Amino acid sequence: MRSTSGPGPTEWGEGRHGVGPWEGEWPEDSRYDEALLREGDRRNVADAYRYWTREAIIADIDTRRHSFHVAIENFENDANIGTVVRTANAFAAAAVHIVGKKRWNRRGAMVTDRYQHLEHHATIDDLVAWCIERDLPIVAIDNTPGAVPLETAELPENCMLVFGQEGPGVTAEAQGAAVMTCSIAQFGSTRSINAGVAAGIAMHAWVRQHADLKRSW
């Protein structure tokens, strides 16, 4: 183990991720977790959050979350949901909404679901009602006839981005409730992009239009 000079984290040896036990006097800050200070922090978190409690990390992100929400339909237990959650966490989405089956494969989330607000809606109608109550326009992301190219679309600053299952795409009910459906330009032979990848592209499109890039890590 190689240590830093003065108080602070130590670095794990080769092949290990994160930081080792804190060296020197512990910081007098309630955001820090004593167990992590003592044992080291190998979590998948930004360096600024090393040794912080989960509650402290969530509270800090809550002060900087963006105004877009993400919804993904889960009628076929899509394995891409974990990827969508992880990406939503990276872009500080307001919340991720799972529509359909409540259970989903969390492996792809890489534990980021612990820091991301999650909501569940049994049906698309439930999601639509939730959005109407909050005056939140729905934007569907799918390559369907008449869709607006995402590359030129002006996304609402407050919105719900909706993604469908791998293969069938966004349901007709979701598209019918959307203020617009946006397509992602493709140039190869495949008919569709992986749902997790499509979600990342769409979220980044929102970030490029509305986020304060000076606040990124």
Image: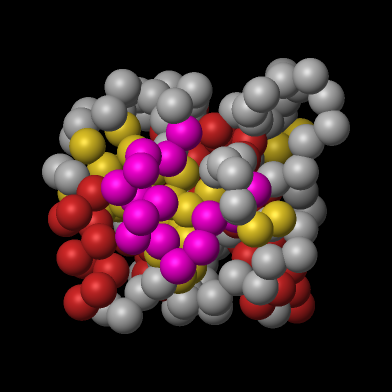
Q: Residue at x 36, y 55 (%)?
A: 176
- Residue 119 within the segment the image draws in magenta: no
Q: Quadrant of residue 55?
A: bottom left
Q: Position of residue 21 (x, y in %)?
A: 55, 41
Q: Residue at x 46, y 33 (%)?
A: 169
Quadrant where the N terminus is found in the figure: top right
Q: How many marks?
A: 0
Q: Is residue 65 visible?
A: no
Is 191 or 51 nearer to us in this picture?
Answer: 191
Q: Is residue 65 left or right of residue 201?
A: left
Q: Quadrant of residue 160?
A: bottom left
Q: Residue at x 54, y 78 (%)?
A: 157
Is 52 or 181 nearer to us in this picture?
Answer: 181
Q: Position of residue 23 (x, y in %)?
A: 61, 50
Q: Residue furthest front?
A: 146
Is 206 or 33 nearer to us in this picture?
Answer: 206
Q: Which residues are magenta?
A: 169-183
Q: Is residue 38 left or right of residue 182?
A: left
Q: Position of residue 52 (x, y in %)?
A: 45, 57
Residue 203, above or below 111 = below
Is 130 or 192 nearer to us in this picture?
Answer: 192
Q: Is residue 179 visible?
A: yes
Q: Is residue 111 left or right of residue 124?
A: right
